Image: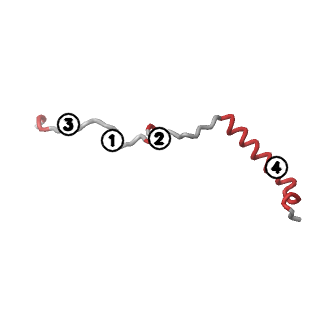
Amino acid sequence: MAQDRISMPQGMGGLVRYFDEYKSKIKFKPGHIIVLSIVVIVIMLILNKFGNSLLGIG
């Protein structure tokens, strides 16, 4: 009976590794993200302080 075994090919068990297949064309350095975050925070603070007069509300 041991001779009747069927040998299956070894593989990944049906798992697909997508991160190996897809490479983004847009790359950001960590410094760019920090600078962009600081710019957004400054814009929000300015709008919070002077937004009503800048937009003509009130």
Residues at marks 4 and 3, CA–CA distance in whole angstroms: 67 Å
For marks 4 and 3 on the same chain, the one whose residue lies earlier in the sequence: 3
Q: Which residue is mark 4?
A: 45
The answer to whether the residue labelled 2 contacts the one labelled 4, judged by CB atoms less than 8 Å apart, is no
Which tag is nearer the camera, tag 2 or tag 1? Answer: 2
* Cα distance in 3D space between marks 3 and 2: 33 Å
Residue type at mark 4 is Leu
- Measured in 3D between alpha carbons, the distance from the residue under mark 2 to the one under mark 1, in whole angstroms, is 21 Å
Please give the label number shown on residue 7. Answer: 3
First-in-chain label (3 vs 2): 3
- Which badge, 2 or 1, comes first in the chain's sequence? 1
Labels 2, 4: front one: 2
Query: Which residue lies under the disc numbered 1?
Result: 13
> Residue 22, labelled with which disc?
2
- Mark count: 4
Q: Earlier in the sequence, mark 1 or mark 3?
A: 3
Q: Secondary structure at mark 3?
A: loop
| Mark 3 closeness class: few <14, some 14–19, many ≥20 residues within 10 Å | few
Callout 2: few (<14), some (14-19), or many (20+) C-alpha neighbours within 10 Å? few
Give the secondary structure at mark 1: loop
Q: Which kind of residue does numbered mark 2 sit on?
A: Tyr
Query: Considering the numbered disc 2 on the image, is that residue within a helix, a strand or a loop?
Result: loop
Earlier sequence position, callout 1 versus callout 4: 1
Contact (CB < 8 A) between labels 3 and 2? Answer: no
- Neighbor class of circle 1 (other Cα within 10 Å; few <14, some 14-19, many 20+) is few
Is the C-beta separation of discs 2 and 1 under 8 Å? no
From this view, report whether residue 19 is shown above or below residue 47.
above
Residue 46 sits above or below residue 20 on the image: below
Q: Distance from label 2 to label 4 (Cα)?
A: 38 Å
